[in-house]
Image (cartoon, rainbow, N blue to C red):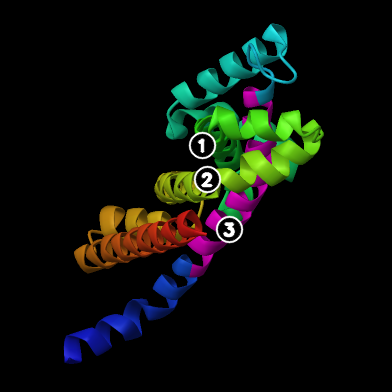
Amino acid sequence: MTKISEFLDNWGTDIWEAIIQTFQMVGISLGISILIGLPLGIMLVLTRPGKAFSNKYVFGILNIFINIVRSVPFIILLFFILPFTRFIVGTTIGVKGVIVPLVIYTAPYIARLMETALLEVDRGVLEAYEAMGMKTRHIIWHVLVRESRSSIILGLTIATISLIGATAMAGLVGGGGLGDLAYRYGHLRYEVDVMYVTVILLIILVQGLQSLGNRVAARLKKD
């Protein structure tokens, strides 16, 4: 008990600040990525051959772009777009400095997950609504998105967990958060206790999110 008290006295403030920074990075990046990724996923579905807005050029460009971005490891992407990040937000360090690369890394991933989820909707259901004369924009939101809600939630859960891993890597370049704390104190200063605590916190965070995502997805599937 004494060791725990001493640890909290020495590192409690730093760990709490790192947790807040991690939530900030994940929350902001995920929100922006969903705003970009969901429409991209819908466009991938609607512009593919045989769909409502079939366009092989638009589909091809989107498909290639997403594949290229997804094929680049986050740590390489982080360094590669440093000039672009500095141009957009004026800095490349701290929470503010990693939002741009996190969004560029996550949005295409979400787009691909959304595409997969939307393509799972029964074609017969879509044809029934089309036969009723429902407009495409209404079919998108009231049929495609609604019918695939469970898969979308599971996809967003996977994307969020991947994003948490990316924020940890962002700590290598001073991005803040638990990754930065683990690197600066756990690795560079050989404070093994700090390393263990950050790893445990990340595991708890990931397990909690996965359980929550599974529960919400299961509930939506029943509705």
The amino acid marked with disc number 3 is Gly
Report x, y in % for residue 223. 52, 59
Residue situated in front as seen by the camera: 190 or 135? 135
Residue 69 percent location from the top left of the image: 54, 24
The disc label shown at residue 117, or none:
1
SS at mark 3?
helix
Give the distance between the C-alpha atoms of the residues marked 1 and 3, in whole angstroms: 22 Å
Mark 3 → mark 2, Cα distance in angstroms: 17 Å
At label 2, the amino acid type is Ile
Q: Name the residue under label 2.
A: 152
Query: Disc 3 vs disc 2: Cβ atoms closer than 8 Å?
Result: no
| Kind of residue at disc 1 | Ala
Whole-percent x, y for residue 16 in the image = 44, 74
- SS at mark 2 in the image: helix
Q: Is residue 33 visible?
A: no
Tell me, yes or no, whether the highlighted magenta stretch contains residue 122: no
Magenta range:
20-45
Give the total number of marks visible in the rendering: 3
**From the viewer's perspective, is 22 left or right of 34?**
left
User: Which of the 4 image quadrants contains residue 206?
Assistant: bottom left
Q: Does the magenta stretch include residue 35?
A: yes
User: Looking at the rendered structure, which numbered label has been put on residue 63?
Assistant: none
Earlier sequence position, callout 3 versus callout 2: 3
Q: Which quarter of the figure has residue 108?
A: top right
The residues bearing labels 2 and 1 have C-alpha atoms spaced at a distance of 6 Å
Q: Is disc 1 surrounded by few (<14), some (14 to 19) or many (20+) residues within 10 Å? A: many
Q: Nearer the viewer, residue 55 or 10?
A: 55
Numbered tag placed on residue 27 in the rendering: 3
**Counting residues from the N terminus, which is met first, the one under dot 2 or under dot 1?**
1
Residue appearing at x 54%, y 29% in the figure: 119
Asked whether the beta carbons under mark 2 and mark 1 sit within 8 Å of each other, the answer is: yes
Q: Which of 142/112 is in front? A: 142
